[in-house]
């Protein structure tokens, strides 16, 4: 499943209103304001449960590279919560953004730290809701 810029048609930025009633939000984290400061570039991460198939999960990642520009977006449906979590861990939006790269091609420490903070929060919420990690 691919979700494109049509998400934002008509000024919509609330994923839940766009995706209802086909999904139920499990967790979301918006990095527009992280640690009390506005970010020049940020990410919005969300995981939904697909209503028609309760064992399917939709992972949505929006990367806002500049406040005035349209976001880059990625979305995939997975057959298990573990695969959804693995996608969140493996997908690396900060590395895809030219704004976050140093001349050497590596990701800036602040971009990596901010994204990792968001990722930790989403994975923690996903685990609380679905118990996906072994203890």
Image (cartoon, helix red, strand yellow):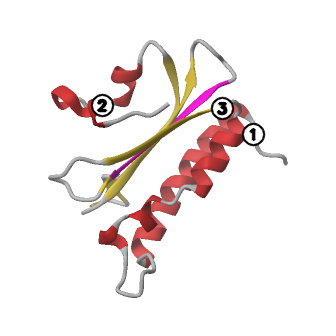
Q: Secondary structure at mark 3?
A: helix
CB within 8 Å, label 3 to label 2: no
The crowd level at tag 2 (other Cα within 10 Å; few <14, some 14-19, many 20+) is: some
Of labels 2 and 1, earlier in sequence is 2
Residue positioned 83% across, 46% down in the render: 134
Q: Which residues are magenta?
A: 56-63
Most common secondary structure along the magenta stretch = strand
Task: Tell me if 17 is positioned left or right of 87 in this view.
Answer: left
Label 1: which residue? Answer: 132
Residue positioned 50% across, 19% down in the render: 23
110 lies above or below 69: below
The CA distance from mark 1 to mark 3 is 9 Å
The crowd level at tag 1 (other Cα within 10 Å; few <14, some 14-19, many 20+) is: some
Label 2: which residue? Answer: 7
Q: Secondary structure at mark 1?
A: loop
Task: Tell me if 39 is positioned left or right of 132 in this view.
Answer: left
């Amino acid at each position: 499943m691919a979700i494109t810029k049509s998400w934002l048609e008509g000024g919509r930025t609330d994923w839940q209103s766009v995706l209802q009633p086909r999904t139920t939000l499990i967790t979301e984290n918006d990095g527009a304001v992280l640690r009390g400061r506005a970010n020049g570039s940020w990410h919005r991460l969300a995981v939904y449960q697909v209503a028609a198939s309760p064992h399917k999960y939709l992972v949505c990642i929006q990367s806002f590279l500049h406040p005035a520009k349209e976001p880059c977006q990625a979305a995939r449906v997975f057959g298990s919560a573990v695969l959804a979590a693995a996608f969140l861990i493996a997908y690396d939006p900060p590395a895809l953004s030219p704004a976050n790269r140093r001349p050497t091609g590596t990701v800036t420490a602040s971009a990596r730290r901010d994204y990792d903070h968001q990722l930790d929060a989403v994975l923690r919420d996903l685990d609380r809701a679905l118990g996906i990690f072994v203890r």
